[in-house]
Image: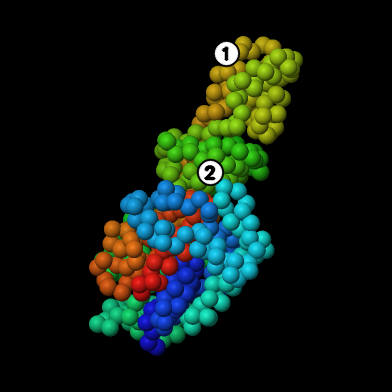
Amino acid sequence: MKVDVLVIGAGAAGLMCAITAGQRGRRVLVLDHANKPGKKILMSGGGRCNFTNLGVTPAQYLCANPHFAKSALARYTPADFVALVEKHRIAYHEKELGQLFCDESSKLIVRMLLDECAAADVRVETSCAVSRVRKTEEGFNVLTAKGEVHAQSLVVASGGLSIPSMGATGFGYELARQFGHGVLATRAGLVPLTLSGKHQEHYQDLAGVALPVAEARVGKRRFRAGLLFTHRGISGPSILQISSYWQPGDDLRLDLSPEQNAGDWLVSQRVARPAAELRNVLGDLLPKRLAQRLCELWLSSKPMRQYRDAELRALGATLHDWPMVASGTEGYRTAEVTLGGVDTDGLSSSTMQSKQVPGLYFIGEVVDVTGWLGGYNFQWAWASGRAAGESA
């Protein structure tokens, strides 16, 4: 089979690239080894797909070159994708912090992308693995489970290593290396953190206890959102966000009461409830089980009248700077994204094309560009896919 553009990977980036190239009149084939397209789209946002974020700027992305994502993000914005969603009459809502979700199902986003592919005469083949890629004078010769494909341009949109149960592999990284591209060390991002030893024992039976708002801090980076204790450690949006910046050995701190000055509040409670035990008072500020555990192991507890103001303010300061000794992460099994990947130094920031191999492109998660939680990674997929599709 001969095509103008072969896209490997029928995820968010790959489908957007295929649509854009198809609309230019290019003959486009999309291949994916999975049994259906858009698997990550389908599972995202609890099945409702957090498809973009209204507050996207390059500052919400991790990359060895912080300037790399600027061009693509500026040329295809959240408003551009929202216009496409509205064109297909998909109802959506803003949940919080600029996060846009489907009212109904993420299946509607996949359907929209496939309908756009069909309108642009793009062919999408699933259950089709790629076993070999060779550069030729005309472009690329690709051996697949369904025969050979000859393509002028090859776009690698194969994703990262996160959620291997959905078919994630290191295929894109191997292909990058084959063609002389650097691949930066990869690790799990947007992932729960694990505790071990005594640290795990202290919190293990708090699994299921949640703080609606907590602040997780590593160095100067901080995120304020929900926190959840799990059987193996800690999770929730604040932890998933900080996990992309945390490395083993880093000092992780939690503010357990970021919206209330705990010291002032405790002093006021001493006046209002002098006979109440600290553990019971703290149970009104924090989840009761967490308050009990903190008092059992670290803070002790006595009637409020027995504390001096200075002691209560010091106690409050401790709650705003609580140390949490994480040992690792849950890994790719539950990670939403993969940090690291194809080195952007070898790619054009405006087209995503390889600087070494004309006609070869890398887009989406396989590239060393990783967004925050909240629709940012989808916007990178749309933007990088669009950039490559305009050129491939």
Q: Secondary structure at mark 2?
A: helix
Give the residue pinned by disc 2.
239
In the image, residue 154 sits, relative to residue 230, either above or below, namely below
Please report the residue visible at 46 percent of the width from the left and 67 percent of the height from the top.
13
- Camera-side residue of 266 and 387: 387
User: Is 88 placed left or right of 131 in the picture?
Assistant: right
Amino acid type of the residue that numbered disc 2 sits on in the rendered structure: Ile
Residue located 49% across and 68% down the image: 11
Q: Is residue 385 left or right of residue 271?
A: left
- How many numbered tags mark residues here? 2
In this picture, residue 295 sits left or right of residue 183: right
Image location (x, y in percent) of residue 206? 64, 39
Q: Amino acid at mark 1?
A: Ala
Which quadrant of the structure image shows residue 249?
Answer: top left
Q: Nearer the viewer, residue 268 or 286?
A: 268
Q: Name the colour scheme.
A: rainbow
> Which numbered dot is residue 310?
1
Please name the residue shown 34% across and 63% down the image.
Answer: 350
Q: Position of residue 270 (x, y in %)?
A: 69, 16
Image: 116 above or below 249 = below
**Residue 347: quarter of image:** bottom left
With 383 as the anchor, is 225 left or right in this view? right
Is residue 301 something one can see in this rendering?
no
